[in-house]
Image: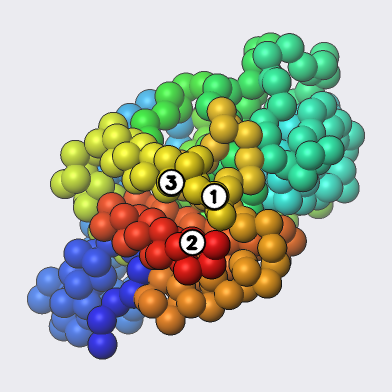
Amino acid sequence: MGRIYNFSAGPAVLPEEVLKEVAGEMLDYKGTGMSVMEMSHRSKAYEEIIKGAEQDLRDLMNIPDNYKVLFLQGGASQQFAMIPMNLMKNKVADYIVTGQWAKKAYQEAAKYGKANKIASSEDKTFSYIPDCSDLPISEDADYVYICENNTIYGTKFKTLPNTKGKTLVADVSSCFLSEPVDVTKYGIIYGGVQKNIGPAGVVIVIIREDLITEDTLPGTPTMLQYKIHVENESMYNTPPAYGIYVCGKVFQWLKNMGGLSVMKERNEEKAAILYDFLDQSELFKGTVCKEDRSLMNVPFVTGNDELDAKFVKEAKAAGFENLKGHRTVGGMRASIYNAMPKEGVIALVEFMKKFEAENK
Ligand SMILES: *Cc1c(COP(=O)(O)O)cnc(C)c1O
């Protein structure tokens, strides 16, 4: 059985080289006589895995020493609560709402303090990124929050908001490691790994040291305190050990590929193939503002629900999986993460051309 082209938004395609490598190590990881799945997280072999993964991530993203790297659980969604619980000293935070994930984070924060929606693109179904050059940032805001790449709608912040000196917190779940970032511009960068890095079950949090304090909101569970996880080097309890191991393999794969600037070039090239086609197609069209287009998630429609459904069905039969748009938006969405080969995008565009010719 061959592999299909998987355009899922998440859990998503992983590099075939990595899958083969972990398969090869499944029964006997480097002479230990066991799988990483069966291994104590306190063992020497596992310590090397998690330490190695952290170091490779630090190298890839050029993470300064005054930032900690955590491998946690609970998905990106748990961070929606963990962030306010740990950072809301003044109980005020400003949220830029550019999609469902940002909206959920905003609603969650409102449980713990004053969450201000300082900008939103909901008026046009989140199809653009609002101008964030001069926002009404609250004087006493503990942080400003964004979802940097909007997985469902297919938009991305091309420039970070002007936070007027306030700490920036970013959910980068669906653009993690897709291009170089300047870590120093953020207080927290976090993301669930199941979009662009590894298997579901791991969330990576990169957090600046001064934000790690004992001074959390009253009643914050031990498991939701950054300080506890930092002090225990992500091993306060059993970490999602196998998932972290696979993430480590992906970090090595990215290094071998040439790092994040090479990934950026590749991702730009792949996205251009699809967007260029959409821009000249008479049947398909992209759904978001051109300047704000994501390199990772590409939503498109025909404008006719029946034709959309027909396209998804025929595409599936031809080996292009998971092209159905998010249940809240409809249409189609092709997620073209790091591990999607250029050939996959070219093949998809060829298929779309054929479909267009047949359904004029
Ligand atoms: C998928 C996604 C989430 C939710 O992730 P979970 O790990 O399922 O909680 C949050 N933010 C963004 C940007 C996402 O793409």
Q: Residue at x 53, y 78 (%)?
A: 313
The CA span between labels 3 and 2 is 11 Å
Mark 1 or mark 3: name the one nearer the start of the chain.
3
Mark 2 or mark 1: name the one nearer the start of the chain.
1
Q: Residues within 10 Å of mark 3 (few under 14, many from 20)?
A: some
For label 1, the residue is: 282
Q: Secondary structure at mark 1?
A: loop
Between tags 3 and 2, which lies in front?
Answer: 2
Q: Is residue 311 above or below residue 34?
A: above
Instruction: Give the camera-side residue of 106 and 175.
Output: 175
For label 3, the residue is: 277
Instruction: Give the camera-side residue of 72 and 323.
Output: 323
Q: Residue 180: percent from the left, percent from the top?
A: 37, 31
The type of residue carrying mark 2 is: Glu
Q: Residue 267: percent from the left, percent from the top?
A: 35, 42
Q: Residue 185: percent from the left, percent from the top?
A: 52, 21
Q: Residue 21: percent from the left, percent from the top?
A: 18, 69
The type of residue carrying mark 1 is: Glu
For label 2, the residue is: 356
185 left or right of 347? right
